[in-house]
Image (spheres, helix red, strand yellow):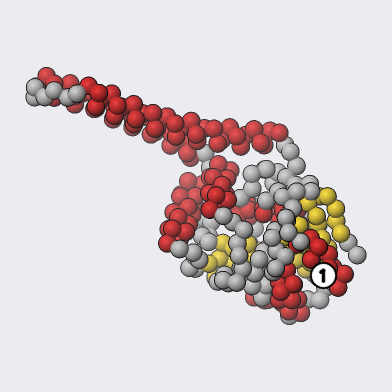
Amino acid sequence: MKLSVVSTLYRSEDNLEEYYARLSDALAQTTEDHEIILVDDGSPDDSLAKALELQRLDNRIRVVELSRNFGHHPAIMAGFQHVQGERVFVIDSDLEEHPALLVEFWKEMEADPDKDVVYGYQTKRRGGWFEKISGHVFYFLLNLSTGMKLQPNQVTARLMTKEYVQALLQHRERNLFLAGLCQVAGYNQHGIAVSKQHKGHTSYSLLKKMALCLTAFTSFTGVPLVAMFFVGVVVSMFSFGLSLYFIYMALFESTVIPSWIAIMTSIWFIGGVLMSFIGITGLYIDKIYQEVKARPLFLVKKVHET
């Protein structure tokens, strides 16, 4: 088999038929020797029923039903475990990314067979000013702290060789940041500028995006822990200098500084720093705890095949 297409389903009921129609058009321009793997990530709507309806019309569709909602990235990894094609194309089913990207990626890989991955990225990030600025800051700090050269604003859509996908599956961490994992896996990767559509509706809320940011930093770098030490040194030096300043003002300038100002300033400053440090340490301990438990990344309830 030449190609496997992997897509996850979560609240995809309204988009699934149009997604399948667009994907079919793209597949007709690439190869008929393909399979479509739809992973139901515990979707609360009728996405699974819709997928099974499509399967009755197209026997090249396989539906992987997870036992509950495990999250976007674990669901993608679940799909990867069931691919049979020589190449694997992954894309979201929410229509934010056009399935026609497959044609562009396919031509790029055909032109240079040495490429193991062709992925898409946005040159201009979608969203309001907060999302654009925060996204820029996130990628800058992540690359700076990890030493990676992660292309900012990557989308889910990417075409990969099966060997590369098998390499991804060898990683066993439970806290997944897929873009980072794809980067550290290595191989010959090539990015293409793409634009997202406005038709689809993302399932990533602000809280989910913030959680993904925390996962990215705590999974790929220990810099925050090192930074805590240096900030602690700076705070100690600042507190010592402030104490000397108060002593100087009292002895040589005859300035009476209310004691409560110095006390409250010190308490608030040092207390805030300590609380943030405890929080950062707690995040890493939590990640260690989850990895040590070694619970499955996902559980497959049933694979629906024709």
User: 216 left or right of 291?
Assistant: left
252 is higher (above) or lower (below) than 133: above
165 and 237: which is toward the camera: 237
Tag count in the figure? Answer: 1
User: 194 left or right of 136?
Assistant: right
233 and 135: which is toward the camera: 135
Q: Is residue 47 visible?
A: yes
User: Residue 71 placed where, x, y %?
Assistant: 67, 51
277 and 88: which is toward the camera: 277
**Residue depicted at 39% across the width and 28% down the height:** 271
**Residue depicted at 70% across the width and 58% down the height:** 10
User: Residue 101 placed where, x, y %?
Assistant: 65, 73
Mark 1 Cα shell of 10 Å, populated few (<14), some (14-19), many (≥20): some
**Residue depicted at 25% across the width and 23% down the height:** 260
User: Residue 291 placed where, x, y %?
Assistant: 67, 37
Q: Quadrant of the C terminus?
A: bottom right
User: Residue 195 placed where, x, y %?
Assistant: 55, 71
283 is higher (above) or lower (below) than 42: above
**Residue depicted at 64% across the width and 48% down the height:** 176
Q: Quadrant of the N terminus?
A: bottom right
250 and 90: which is toward the camera: 250
Residue that label 1 marks = 54
